[in-house]
Image (cartoon, rainbow, N blue to C red):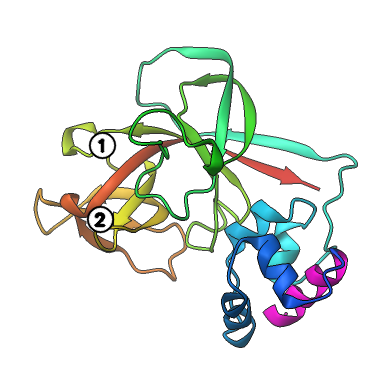
């Protein structure tokens, strides 16, 4: 489905009279919204986080119903195989983050305390080891293991080779420059280029593996669970 048509449908649903009103609601500039339409591209994470009633599958494929159905919704947590021996918590409240404009995986205010402005909501997860945060998955690099719109809960670890369980799934913040990072969800494997590198591998074989230096990684978190809503 043409992304510009998807944007028009969302704008119509929320009854925005102008593109400016729609852009303000999304927290972006109007020319960014125009670029999405002209380039047939959408920032799925932003739409999902701002438009809570919009179905992620419809947003990604244009198929099905535009609005989520709360009736008979089932949340299905899928835990990864545990490699750590840290304790299981009977219940814990995990912040769901919007990490678009942050360097790391746990946004802090002046390096101390969570930046509440980056918290979209909180999710409650039973019988899980400690999690530092959660984000929405986007794109199709981990499809069908993960779908765009799935929630991923993770535990941040030190960016050190000795801390990485190779072959496991991680949320990785890769430095693009001194002030920005790209967040991605990948399997982390050992690299043939040497110990200074790791290889980021997608589940979707249409995405080629990429070797990155450890020094390029601003933050990394072990994926502890994925949560998918079946509507």
Tag 1 and tag 2, C-beta contact below 8 Å: no
Question: Could you tell me residue 212's position as x and y percent?
Answer: 22, 59
Quick one: label 1 or label 2, which is nearer the N terminus? Answer: 1
Q: Is residue 148 above or below residue 91?
A: below
Taking the spot 73% from the left edge, 76% from the top edge, the residue there is: 19
Q: Which residue is mark 1?
A: 164
Taking the spot 23% from the left edge, 32% from the top edge, the residue there is: 163
Question: Could you tell me residue 139's position as x and y percent?
Answer: 53, 63
* Magenta region: 1-13
Residue 2 seen in the figure? no
Please tell me how many numbered marks the rendered image carries: 2
Secondary structure of the residue carrying tag 1 is loop
Q: Nearer the viewer, residue 188 or 152?
A: 152
- Check residue 199 in the rendering and tell me which mark sits there, or answer none: 2
Secondary structure of the residue carrying tag 2 is strand
Q: Is residue 59 above or below residue 118?
A: below
* Picture quarter with the N terminus: bottom right
Name which quarter of the figure residue 151 lies in.
top right
Question: Could you tell me residue 164's position as x and y percent?
Answer: 25, 36
Question: Could you tell me residue 58's position as x and y percent?
Answer: 75, 65
Q: Is residue 7 magenta?
A: yes
Taking the spot 43% from the left edge, 66% from the top edge, the residue there is: 205
Q: Is residue 101 above or below residue 106?
A: below
Is 223 left or right of 57, judged from the image as shown? Answer: left
Residues packed near mark 1 inside 10 Å, few (<14), some (14 to 19) or many (20 plus): some
Residue placed farthest to the right in the image? 71
Residues packed near mark 2 inside 10 Å, few (<14), some (14 to 19) or many (20 plus): many
């Amino acid at each position: 489905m043409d992304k510009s048509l998807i944007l028009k449908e969302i704008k119509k649903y929320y009854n925005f009279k102008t593109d400016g009103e729609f852009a303000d609601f999304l927290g972006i500039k109007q020319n960014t919204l125009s670029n999405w339409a002209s380039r047939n591209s959408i920032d799925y994470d932003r739409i999902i986080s701002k438009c809570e009633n919009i179905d992620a599958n419809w947003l990604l494929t244009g198929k099905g119903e535009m609005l989520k159905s709360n009736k008979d919704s089932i949340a299905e947590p899928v835990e990864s195989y545990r490699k750590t021996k840290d304790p299981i918590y009977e219940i814990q409240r995990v912040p769901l983050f919007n990490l678009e404009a942050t360097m790391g995986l746990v946004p802090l205010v002046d390096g101390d305390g969570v930046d509440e402005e980056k918290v979209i909501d909180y999710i409650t997860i039973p019988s899980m080891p400690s999690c530092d945060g959660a984000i929405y998955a986007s794109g199709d690099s981990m499809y069908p293991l993960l779908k765009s719109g799935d929630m991923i809960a993770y535990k941040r670890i030190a960016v050190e080779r000795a801390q990485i369980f190779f072959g496991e799934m991680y949320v990785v913040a890769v430095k693009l420059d001194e002030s920005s990072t790209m967040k991605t969800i990948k399997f982390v494997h050992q690299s043939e280029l040497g110990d200074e590198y790791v290889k980021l591998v997608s589940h979707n074989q249409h995405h080629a593996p990429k070797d990155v230096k450890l020094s390029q990684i601003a933050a990394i978190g072990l994926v502890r669970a994925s949560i998918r809503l079946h509507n």
